[in-house]
Amino acid sequence: MKTIFLLLLPLYSVFPQYLFQSEPKVLVRIIDNKDALRIIFNDDWILTSEAENKNIFASQEEIIFTVDNNRLTITRPNKEVYVSSESFVFNSLDNKGTLTIKDVPYGIGWWWEGKEDRIYEGEIHVYRTKKNKLEVVIYLPIEDYLKGVVPYEIGSDSPIEALKAQAVAARTEAIVALRSKLYSGEHYDLTSDVECQVFGGNHKRTVQSDLAVELTRGLILTEHGEPINAYYSSNCGGHSETIKNVWPDRPEAESYTTSQSDWEAQSDIDLRIEENFREWIFSNPPSYCNPNMNNKLPEWSQTNFRWKKEFTKEEISQMTSQGRDLGNLIDIKILDRGTSGRAKLVRFVFEKEKTVVSGDLNIRQRFSPPLRSSCFVVDKTETGFILNGAGWGHGVGMCQSGAIGMANRGKNFEEILKHYYIKAALLQSY
């Protein structure tokens, strides 16, 4: 039976037809803690300094930013120097140009942390922070921003319907963040890494990922006429989680008040019960995100449905004590689980003290690098501990691996969104 996904219009009395009268623009922070920066211009760009002096930088020219003595400095290859106490602004000469920023950090604090050269478009702002570091912010239309989000979040080689579902979810998240100021700072509306949404600029964009954004232009998810936080994570492990078990202090949209199997048919297994959860995590449950049932899932997804981590007694004691002298770790006790089996409350028993940790992210970050999810069981060995887990991420909202699995089975983006945001409707926001 085809799922009917309601398109609501109009919505707001202030704007008789749309949430916004025109496409909004966003300020996205991509760097905030560097001492030096290398930029290569791929086209001709204009620099505007505080004194409104304009200087043209030619294609393929490379410059170096530094910050010291409470001032910003730009050095050109010919040793010409530009100085500002607060900021610089760059614009492409024809408004379509790009530049490359070298060694942009990403995944900070996670196991995939690294640096890569990234290509950007839009208006580029460089600031000196109060800590005397470089902060880089990009100002661009929200649809162009989304073209730098979608391929980084779900992979540019994903099927088009999964890409479209991702575009709608990412657009909704951005618009909610714009209105709520959830991720905003002095110079920016959004950030570019995992605490917000991953925005990597143009490096991974493809014709198909751009098309997914264009085909869903302006579409967002709402409940009762209001945009919702359209949460998503890489792989739910086969079962979604309710929001109150992950973020008890965040708004509880109706779509997140229930938890379900990532499949058409629902299971009645209660994963809050330890014995049930242990049996489930070592099983092969039918799920859209299960690579054993969907062999077309991308490689990054296949290793996250089920995972295993082994720790020696020494290394796990050191990381979970977080620098305190607590002696060896003796045991890990899961005191409470959410509806997906994700740990809500964990007791770490050391030789000298017992420590209780609550909350999905806090539990994951007790380990170094942080665990893929808090959906795991613990077994002690003679030499340490083994954790067998499921999924990558918090499990609230859309499972990106599951969205790909659904698309591979012929589901369209509306059906995908309805499966993960069960009470939501689509709205044309501008």
Image (cartoon, helix red, strand yellow):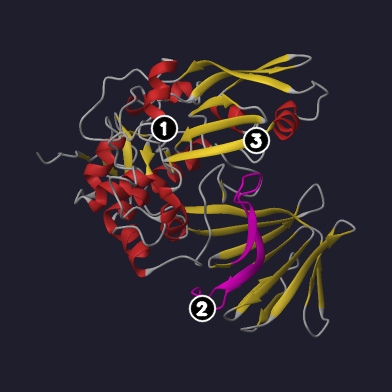
Residue 415, relative to residue 85: is it above or below?
Answer: above
Left or right of 195, for residue 277 = left
| Coordinates of residue 270 in the picture (x, y in percent) | 34, 17
Report the quarter where the N terminus lies.
Answer: top left
Would you name the residue on which mark 3 appears?
311
SS at badge 1: loop
* Residue at image coords 45%, 52%: 300
SS at badge 2: loop
Mark 2 residue type: Asp
Residue 94 image label = 2
Q: Are marks 2 and 3 in contact (CB under 8 Å)?
A: no
Mark 1 residue type: Val
* Residue at image coords 45%, 21%: 244
Residue 160 image label = none
Farthest-out residue, left: 1
Residue 396 image label = 1
Per the rendered image, the range of residues in magenta is 90-117
Q: How many marks do you count on the picture? A: 3
Residue 114 belongs to the span the image colors magenta: yes
